[in-house]
Structures are given as C-alpha cells and as structure tokens.
C-alpha cells in the first residue's frame, strides 16, 4: 500500500489555526505524541470508522488528530510530520493517514507507535519514544494508493435490505468528501446520505437494485465538484464487502 505525497501550504496556514500555532514556509509548527498499541500498528476502533483498514493502511503509519479531524471530514487525509529534534530525527519524518480522533498535550497528532518511531534516525527510536511528546512541523500532502481505485465498503453494521452504511476507502489526492448521495431510480432523484460519524455514511431504506452514487469532493485548489460512480454497489450487497468504484481521485 505504497504512498507518495506532496502539498502546498497556503490552505493550512489560512485555516482557522490556533494562535499559538505558526507556519514556516509550507509547514505548521505543533507537537506530536503516540498511543499504546500491542503490535505497534493502528487501531481498528478509530473514530473514522475504518475498521481493520485503519489499523494497517499505509503500513500502519496512521494518526489520530484533534482539530484536523473536522467532524470527520478530515478522515483519510494525509500529512507529512517531521520532528524538530535534529539529533534524534530524520529530515523527512513520516507520512501518515488520519484514521482516528485524539487529543493530547497541545498536540495535533497522536501517532501509531510505528509512525512515531519512523521519525527517528537509525538506532534512535528508543530515545525518541522516551521523549513521549516532541515538537513537530507538518503539512498536508496528497495521498497516493498505487493499484487502488476509490472503494466503497459496506459497513459491518449494515442490514440488507433495510439499512445501508458505507465507508470510502483509498481516498487519493488531497481531497475531502463533503456529501454522498444515492440515485433513487423510481423517483428520478438523488437522496442524500447522513454522515453517521467519521468517514461512515448511512441511509435507512436504501434504493433497491444496483446502487449508483455521487459524492461531493473538495480539492486542494479549493474547487468543489461532484464525482459519479454508476452501479458501484450491486443489488445484493453484503455487509463487510468493499466494492471498487473504478474512480480515481487526484
């Protein structure tokens, strides 16, 4: 699940950042810590609702965030995080995916243990972990998922045919999903889904038959548009199954 990322800084610095946080070039200064994990991976119970995907995506280089969570709109966003202890940390830092909500001691990121340790220079991870909390700088960067289109996973709590909840996976680029709608063929209209929490969208009594969706995307250039995925979810959909949209966000 390889990633490569980049980002321009204007949006992050203009957003309603806390007064104590400042921007240098295209990075924003903050702090980061890490959470406990028995296997150093992410957590499958993160607030974004990603489940097992949230535990392992991006080689488990994942993070919980607070104000970057943005009521779930920030789920799936990618960031480069570099620690500011040059004797302990590399210049490149680590690229992480937002999979959870979490608040720490004036931190913007609570990293998985693997992601936190990856900021360290060779053989310095133990010393970095001993710090617990470190000063960092970060920037938003596009996500890249080699070999993957955007996918719609039917949430495990869905109940065919009466209740449908979906999660968007492999959200590439530097995008945010603002709305999701299903096409109601008999009424010839789009029906809006509810953001249940995080990246989970749901609807009682969904349309019968194969389901076409459209979703509103806000891109890095500030342009908002609707992307369409025709008949992406089959009429006999099953909970826990992910369906390929054939859509590539950039």
Image (cartoon, grey):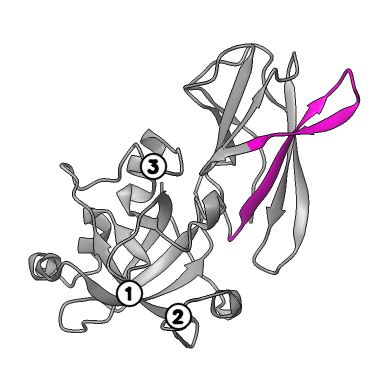
Whole-percent x and y of residue 119? 25, 68
Q: Residue furthest bottom?
A: 24
Residue at x 69% of width, y 52% of height: 217
- Where disc 2 sits, the SS reads strand
User: Can you see residue 140?
Assistant: yes
- The answer to which of 89 and 160 lies nearer the viewer is 160
Badge 2 is on which residue? 27
First in sequence: mark 1 vs mark 2: 2
Q: Is residue 62 left or right of residue 146?
A: left
- Where disc 3 sits, the SS reads helix
Q: Is residue 94 left or right of residue 129?
A: right
- The answer to which of 249 and 215 lies nearer the viewer is 215
* Crowdedness near tag 2: few (<14), some (14–19) or many (≥20) residues, C-alpha within 10 Å: many
First in sequence: mark 3 vs mark 1: 3
Q: CA distance from mark 3 to mark 2?
A: 25 Å
First in sequence: mark 3 vs mark 2: 2
Q: Are marks 1 and 2 in contact (CB under 8 Å)?
A: yes
Badge 3 is on which residue? 54
Residue at x 57% of width, y 76% of height: 8
Residue at x 88% of width, y 17% of height: 186
User: Can you see residue 230?
Assistant: no
Q: Residue furthest right?
A: 188
Q: Which mark is residue 66?
A: none
Please tell me in which quadrant of the rendered image residue 245 appears. Answer: top right
* Crowdedness near tag 1: few (<14), some (14–19) or many (≥20) residues, C-alpha within 10 Å: many
Range of the magenta residues?
A: 174-194
Badge 1 is on which residue? 82
**Is 150 inside the magenta-drawn segment?**
no
Please tell me in which quadrant of the rendered image residue 44 appears. Answer: top left
């Amino acid at each position: 699940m390889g990633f490569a990322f980049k980002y321009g800084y204007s949006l992050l610095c203009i957003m309603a950042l806390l007064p104590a946080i400042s921007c240098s070039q295209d990075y924003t200064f903050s702090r980061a810590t890490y959470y406990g994990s028995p296997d150093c991976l992410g957590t499958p119970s993160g607030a974004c609702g990603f489940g097992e995907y949230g535990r392992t995506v991006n080689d488990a280089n994942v993070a919980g965030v607070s104000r970057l969570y943005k009521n779930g709109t920030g789920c799936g966003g990618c960031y480069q995080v570099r620690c500011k202890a040059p004797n302990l940390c590399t210049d490149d830092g680590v690229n992480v995916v937002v999979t959870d909500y979490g608040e720490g001691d004036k931190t913007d990121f609570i990293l998985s243990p693997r992601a936190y340790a990856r900021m360290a220079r060779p053989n310095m991870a133990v010393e970095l972990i001993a710090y617990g909390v470190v000063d960092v700088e970060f920037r938003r960067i596009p996500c890249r998922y080699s070999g993957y289109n955007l996918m719609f996973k039917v949430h495990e709590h869905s109940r065919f045919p009466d209740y449908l909840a979906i999660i968007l996976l492999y959200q590439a680029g530097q995008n945010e999903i603002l709305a999701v709608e299903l096409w109601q063929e008999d009424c010839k209209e789009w029906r809006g889904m509810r953001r249940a929490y995080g990246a989970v969208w749901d609807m009682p009594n969904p349309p019968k038959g194969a389901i076409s969706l459209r979703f509103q995307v806000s891109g890095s250039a500030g342009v908002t548009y609707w992307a369409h995925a025709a008949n992406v979810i089959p009429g006999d959909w099953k909970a826990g199954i992910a369906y390929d949209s054939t859509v590539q966000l950039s």
